Image: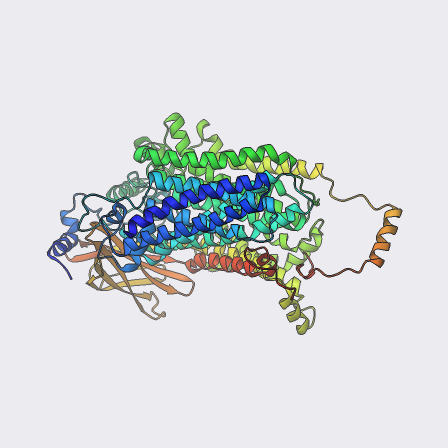
Amino acid sequence: MIGRGTLLALVLFLAGPVLAQEPAAPPDRPLASASQEARAQAIFEVVRCVVCQHESISDSPAGIAGDMRRLIREEIAGGASDQAIKDDLVRRYGDYVLFTPPVRTGTWLLWFGPALLVLAGGAALWAFMRRTPAGTAPLSPDEERRLADLLQTETVRPDPDASPPHEGR
Amino acid sequence: MIVEFGAFALVLALVLSVLQTGLAAVGRARRSPLLAGGADGAALASAFAVTLAFAALIYAFSVSDFSVENVARNSHTDKPMLYKVSAAWGSHEGSLVLWCGVMAVFGAILARARGLPFGLKTSAVGVQGALTTLFLAFAVFTSNPFNRIADAPVQGNSLNPLLQDPALAIHPPLLYLGYVGFSVTFSLAVAALIEGRAFSGFWPAWGRWVRPWALVSWVFLTAGITLGSFWAYYELGWGGWWFWDPVENASFMPWLAGAALLHSAVVTERRGALAGWTVFLALLAFSFSMLGAFLVRSGVLTSVHAFAVDPERGLMLLGILGVAAGSAFALFAWRAPQLKGGGMFAPVSREGALVLNNLFLTVAAATVLLGTLYPLILEAATGQTISVGPPYFAMTFTPLMLVAFIILPAGPLLSWKRADAKGAIQRLALAGGLAIACGFVFWLAFEPKKALAAAGIAIGAWLILGALAEVIERIRLFRVPVAEVSRRARGLPLGAWGMTLAHAGLGVFVLGAVAETSFKLEAADALPIGGSVITGPWKATLTDVRIVEGPNYLAEQGVVTVTSVDGRATPRTVTSERRFFPAGGQTTTEVGLDFRGLDDVYVVMGERRATPGGEQAWSVRLYHNPWARLIFLGPAIMCLGGVLSLMDRRLRLAMPGRRKRVAA
């Protein structure tokens, strides 16, 4: 059942683009050259929509994302390099606009932390393996004799919970 | 009345949890089975009380009792019953009750466990009770979902329409079963640290108890994350499935720590080695769960500046995280040097391979942590704002995982203690050769040629073929008569099949993720009725647009016919909708999905607009997502592998509440 309020809402919904406060972005016009358009798409993926939560401008339906896409396409068509376009965006909106954080003193830990951790972990492992001897000393003749005795006298009862023996286990 | 009853049950559960903690502590100190039994009883009663409280909340939502503030804020009479019920865990308050409920029920299962040594079990029940107390107190004192409002509104605010979706209705319960499942491994780890003076054979027994809990939690978390990712894929209408969004990362960190825990617990159970490390991971997994809860609920993440949105609750959660994780890790630092593992092994051995797995998985988890928290910390410290997104993780996380994947298939072929590396390499040579061939064929078949993508495909194939090679090796396929092969196959423990499936499922996921990320195509255009848009091999024609009335929404539904450009594929009709929910005034999109083999043709209809000629038109986006099926199929196979492992007798014996059966 549709009530009057709902009907009104429906009218507003269908007329949305006309009445809404923020006009919807005009449809994207891809660049004529396929290679230039591919470059534009690659840049869209790494540029953050500045009013959204965590969306790239390639995903975002927001009006400003559409504006930014158009701007980037214009700059590519105008012959700007990818780096120049990104620099330009950073000048306008700050580092926040790129999903790739800059490499500078404050972000060294961010960028090199993972590699450092792998190296530190690997070094710790190496030290650990060196400290603990891998094998046990060979049995003395006396121990060998005792083992042989045990193996002969003791009937080995299979453990019902143990897994069946397999190679590689 | 039922609502007051629910509020009462929630407070009762809190009191019972306090009782559980106290009785267990005193019972442990005095070695009194009577008091410890009392703690078990309190755990059971507390679980029962939270369950009743949660049932009362669901009742309030199902009858749309708007005199309850939480119901008024999150529900609406027009919603279908499924979403009325799921709205019970759709808000901060309600989901917290679910969290506490899962924690208390798992605590009760732990309390009913048989066969654990007295000290270990009593301590674990006590710790679980303390954790439940912390979270219940948080729920009762700051986030009580049963609060009434003086003037009940006639109609509620409704649930965010994005969440009104079957996948997202069951996504939080699955996720919470995973997150909170790690609370049990956490409690068992703290209990092991408290008990300290471990007797011989303690660590294998402890590992045997931790493994099923780690596995259950990991399976639920995998299922929950996959469902969430699938939801993002078809509900948000962006064509993507993982965005390295901080909220996604919050669930991915416990998953990675849990995966590492699963593997290191095997070493502890089988060989008594790595005890300290396994304890550490058991603490870490649940600490990540709590960190995730803090990040998502405090408002730190919705916007970097939004810490003040709810400072009280955020700080309380940070306090809980600090108390629980802080004291556990302090205890670990104090006791860890005394933990004696035993079980020595050579670098090239099953243990060695599992240690490497752990190195990579924990560094990967640390990388996700770094990428998620760094912008927050940097801004707090220096005021600089940065964004950490997909390119960062592609450069740090992905290489780590790729190296781990290259080593992975060798692990299961190595024997315990000391292994023959050459033998393992020989047995994997065929799989390796075939995997490289797969990569090469892929490189030839897909345009444009991308070497990195081909390498990724080779690694995915390597994981699958390596898992197959391991099974073939074990059942001696092609080498012994068929009867012997089938005898061996039946003799393989379910856990071995589970491991093989899980590793192969990972390979399936890698194939899908690489193909989709590298060869996704999209096109968009404003289409009048009868107009079409082309991307890659597909052509989508907008044949009709009609108004559809849903239970609580109105939709503009675009009927789109998908055919191949060369006309050879059978045309199929899909519908994409733009739904308008009058209750909240929000609009959502429903994606039209046409499954073509492994590929998805993904159609999104957007707003109505005019063509340059003034004709009425709709913006339509068309995506070609190659092999996208595999992205979700892979984790499903991994879950199946986990479930098979859980059914293994060796693990089942360690599950609670069952008597040890007479040997079969």
Residue B278's spot in the image, x, y percent?
A: 59, 43
Q: How many marks?
A: 0
> Residue B555, can we see it?
yes
Q: Residue at x 58, y 33 (%)?
A: B333
Which residue is the extreme one toward the top?
Answer: B382
Front one among A5 and B609:
A5
Q: Is residue A81 above or below residue B662?
A: above
Q: Residue at x 45, y 46 (%)?
A: B252
Q: Classify residue B275 as left or right of residue B250.
A: right
Front one among B63 and B499:
B63
Q: Is residue A72 above or below residue B51?
A: above
Q: Classify residue A112 as left or right of residue A98.
A: right
Residue A44's spot in the image, x, y percent?
A: 34, 44
Q: Is residue B87 above or below residue B131?
A: below
Residue B107's spot in the image, x, y percent?
A: 48, 49
- Colour setting: rainbow
> Residue B288, can we see it?
no
Q: Residue at x 20, y 47 (%)?
A: A24
Residue B629's spot in the image, x, y percent?
A: 42, 60
Q: Indicate the quadrant containing the C terminus of chain B: top left, top right, bottom left or bottom right.
A: bottom right
Front one among B510 and B650:
B650
